[in-house]
Image: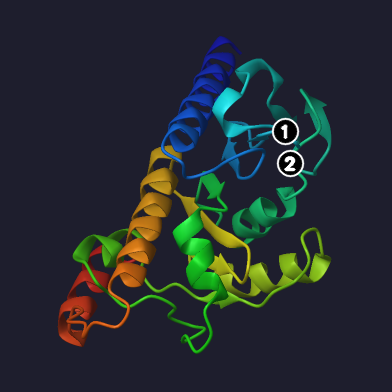
Amino acid sequence: MTGRISQQTALRDEIARIGASLFARGLTSGSTGNISAVTDDGSLLLTPTNSSLGTLDPARLSLMSPDGRLLDGDPPTKEAFLHASMYAHRPDDRAVVHLHSAYSVAVSIMDGLDPMDVLPPLTAYYVMRVGRLPLVPYFPPGDEALAQAVAALAGRHHAVLLANHGPVVSGSSLCDAQYAIEELEDTAKLFLLLAGHRLRPLTDAQRNELEARYRK
């Protein structure tokens, strides 16, 4: 029991630390964005509804049972269904981060992108940490159809971009999910900075080699 409590305490502290870091660097603002992690016993820790990632209290994080009951803490984020959709189809992943980060949201609003591969492979680290990024069609926040749309892609992609909304990324750990969503945001920024310029992304051969080595 002591080990289980210690693991959960460490996860709570890590969620608060990552939330504060994302907020301090302008990757989230106000009460936008949410983070979750799976505990050793299969329970889920989530950031509470209407909370700022910059000022999370580890003791007040939402603790949910595997069947969705609130066990402890404040009511969970209203977007908990996005996290549940990722975990349901990616059982080996242990964390999910969802942001409304500006550059990724800007890309999600653009017309004419490939809905199954939104961003070009501009860097090796984007391919290694994100892979191919599909665009989930727009649904109002909280709409059950949004959960179904995410679920349809989650088995093949650990990162998705919600149209007119923002990215959702899962990972094998909190750090893995954090680093991937930051890489996604940096690539979205590069993509917008390079608008109007001729691009020289990685070749298909270069991309395929990286995917074979680091496939998510």
Residue located beneath label 1 in the image: 48
Q: Quadrant of residue 39?
A: top right
* Residue 37 x, y percent position in the rendering: 57, 38
Residue drawn where x is 46% and y is 37% of the image: 22
Dot 1 alpha-carbon crowd within 10 angstroms: few under 14, some 14 to 19, many 20 or more: many
Q: Residue 170, relative to residue 207: is it above or below?
A: above
Residue drawn where x is 61% and y is 72% of the image: 163
Dot 2 alpha-carbon crowd within 10 angstroms: few under 14, some 14 to 19, many 20 or more: many
- Cα distance between the residues tagged 1 and 2: 5 Å
* Residue 214 x, y percent position in the rendering: 26, 63
Q: Residue 108, relative to residue 204: is it above or below?
A: above
Q: Amino acid at mark 1?
A: Pro
Q: Residue 60, relative to residue 116: is it above or below?
A: above
Q: Amino acid at mark 2?
A: Thr
- Tag 1, which secondary structure? loop
Specify how the rendered protein is coloured: rainbow
Q: Quadrant of residue 119?
A: bottom left
Which mark, by number, is residue 151?
A: none
Residue located beneath label 2 in the image: 77
* Residue 4 x, y percent position in the rendering: 57, 19
Say if mark 1 contacts mark 2, CB within 8 Å.
yes
